[in-house]
């Protein structure tokens, strides 16, 4: 990835990790201020980019799961099962789950290519 961080973000003091786009799906980019955060590792998995680090001032450790969920119901279910397993293993830790969940608040906001409603797109 060719990313001139200083030019776009006003400072060169940023770190980043990314997962490249696959087909029509967009990629995932996670950025942080390196003067505030010490990132220990990042792990690219299908549909999620995991980051683990700590805040330099407080020493507090954290995890971030940056998600780009698939539209396919079965793939989405598998993603949420794997995220749930990971979150269970991180019980008691500081975790932020963020990203594009490909979900809508009202079922009428999205229809599948076949014209019907998609069950996992609806967030109650």
Image: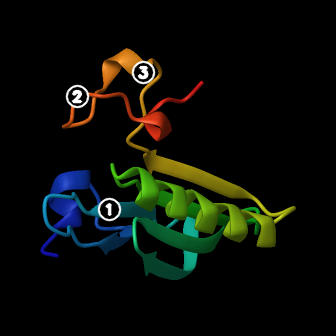
Q: Residue at x 39, y 62 (%)?
A: 31
Does residue 7 lie above or below 102 as drawn?
below
**Element under label 3?**
helix
Q: Nearer the viewer, mark 2 or mark 1?
A: 2
Q: Please indicate whether residue 40 sits to the left or right of residue 94 in the image.
A: left
Could you tell me residue 21's position as x and y percent?
20, 67
Q: Nearer the viewer, mark 2 or mark 3?
A: 2
Q: Are marks 2 and 3 in contact (CB under 8 Å)?
A: no
**Element under label 2?**
loop
Q: Quadrant of residue 70?
A: bottom left
- Location of the N terminus (image quadrant): bottom left
Q: Which residue is mark 3?
A: 107
How packed mark 1 is, by other alpha carbons closer than 10 Å (few <14, some 14-19, many 20 or more), is some
Mark-to-mark CA distance, 1 and 3: 26 Å
- Res. 52 in view: yes
Could you tell me residue 112's position as x and y percent?
26, 35
Q: Which residue is mark 2?
A: 115
Q: Quadrant of residue 82?
A: bottom right
Q: Which residue is mark 1?
A: 28
How packed mark 2 is, by other alpha carbons closer than 10 Å (few <14, some 14-19, many 20 or more), is few
Point out the tag, 1 or 3, that comes first from the N-terminus: 1
């Amino acid at each position: 990835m060719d990313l001139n961080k200083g030019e776009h973000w006003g400072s060169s003091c940023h770190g980043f990790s990314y997962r490249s786009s696959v087909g029509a799906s967009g990629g995932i980019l996670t950025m942080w201020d390196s003067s505030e955060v010490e990132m220990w590792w990042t792990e690219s998995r299908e549909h999620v980019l995991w980051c683990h680090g700590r805040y330099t001032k407080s020493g507090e450790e954290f995890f971030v799961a940056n998600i780009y969920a698939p539209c396919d119901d079965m793939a989405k279910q598998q993603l949420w099962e794997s995220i749930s397993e990971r979150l269970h293993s991180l019980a008691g830790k500081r975790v932020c789950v963020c990203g594009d969940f490909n979900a809508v608040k009202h079922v009428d906001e999205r229809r599948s290519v076949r014209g019907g409603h998609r069950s996992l797109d609806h967030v109650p």
